[in-house]
Amino acid sequence: MAPDFLLPTNSIVRPDKDTFLNEVNPFEGMMSRFDRAAELLDLEPGLYKVLRHPEKQIITSIPVMMDNGEVEVFQGIRVLYNTSRGPAKGGIRFDLNVTLDEVTALAAWMTWKCAVVNIPFGGAKGGVICDPLKMSVGELERLTRRYTASIISTLGPDSDVPAPDVNTNERVMAWIMDTYSMRVGHTVTAVVTGKPVEMGGSLGRREATGRGCMLVTRDALKHLGMDVKGATVAVQGFGNVGSVGAQLLQREGCKIIAISDRTGGWHDPKGIDVDAAIEYVKKHKTLEGYNKGTAVTNEELLTLEVDVLLPAALENVITTKNAAQIRAKVICEGANGPTTAAADAILDEKGIFVIPDILANAGGVTVSYFEWVQDRGGYFWTEKVVNERLEDIMVNSFAAVLNLATQHKVNMRTAAYMLSISRVATVHRLRGIYA
């Protein structure tokens, strides 16, 4: 069932150009992992077909009056992959590289991510093809509100709950919430998560994904018999996830020896002061010109000899082209899809312990769930309570995946997919097929 680019575990080969293009297709990569887990679970054929297809894919045109008086038409996408366990949950991104394949893959990942940490959500994702860096605040607001109006039939706290993603933030969520609330005639805070705290957002939400990465990395090092204190870490991507993850790992005693963003990175074997780097980025927007240590490219950072590699930037950064050069002992996937399915086999052969994205970065959606619960109940928790409950879920989920991996003698990614798919499949069996 797996596509032919999924390599056997006993071979390291270089793909041709066409194979590589297939390798980095996000939907194909996600499905190859799904197929492997479904095979091990002996998933019945009918249920396999149900779970292999998204429930709903929306493609919509978004006309926007630009500041110069001209009308531009953008394309928006929203995919609801599976809602058997609860309302669809997933971010909205504004980016020129948004595609239906990418959004569908991300919606499927959200389905498995919510299931692996056992929160009662299904999976969704959305996106608008645009360059937000070239748009004014007014243009972005009009784009957001028109996009919201075009998918409003799916939105709602009981049906589809968006969140921030690439190039969207609290302000964009506020616009979506307001647009939806105006349509229904009353304020509905639970229709989105990742909102400003003043509008019903949760304390601890901004740090949640990075905190989750820290928690599972800490447990992975303990499982492998490695000392957390002094463990060396390289972080690719110094945005919200990477910077918070690096900061919290440093507080646990790890030594952060390399960091990077889209402008490049810096390597210092003696350790980097993460707090100082965060302050620099707040002032200068990027790490360009930081000049602390030796300059490295993003590609070079991935192959540094470290205990932990935290790819927290883009998809498909670890492929068959560079997987053989990875020297980390542990990879914690802070980004969605940083490792291609074909590269998994190479990392397995090298004995690298990979904490897969659907587990590693699930801290964000977990605290989004907390935010939704708080909005629905009208009662808000302290940050200490949020962090304690997040730790309980991440630690228990890591242990459950590790137990399954040990039991079935598979890697952590396959075990995570097995756990999540089995939970979704169980609900489908219980509910049956509506006819």
Image (cartoon, rainbow, N blue to C red):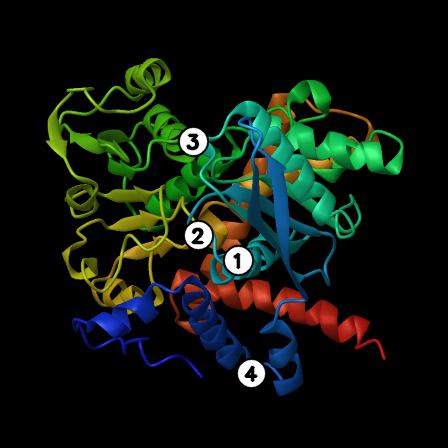
What distance separates the C-alpha of mark 1 from that of mark 3? 27 Å
- Which residue is at the front of the view, 269 or 279? 279
Residue that badge 4 annotates: 42
Which of the two discs, 4 and 1, labels the residue nearer the N terminus?
A: 4
What distance separates the C-alpha of mark 3 from that of mark 2? 27 Å
Indicate the quadrant where residue 47 lies.
bottom right
Which of the two discs, 1 and 3, labels the residue nearer the N terminus?
A: 1
Helix, strand, or loop for circle 4? loop
Left of 325 or right of it: where is 223?
A: right
Q: Quadrant of the C terminus?
A: bottom right
Helix, strand, or loop for circle 1? helix
Q: Mark 4 near mark 2, Cβ–Cβ under 8 Å?
A: no
Residue that badge 3 annotates: 133
Residue that badge 2 annotates: 357
Depth check, mark 2 against mark 1: the one in front is 1
Which of the two discs, 4 and 3, labels the residue nearer the N terminus?
A: 4
Indicate the quadrant where residue 258 lies.
top left
- Which residue is at the front of the view, 197 or 187? 187
Which residue is at 30% across, 67% downward? 21
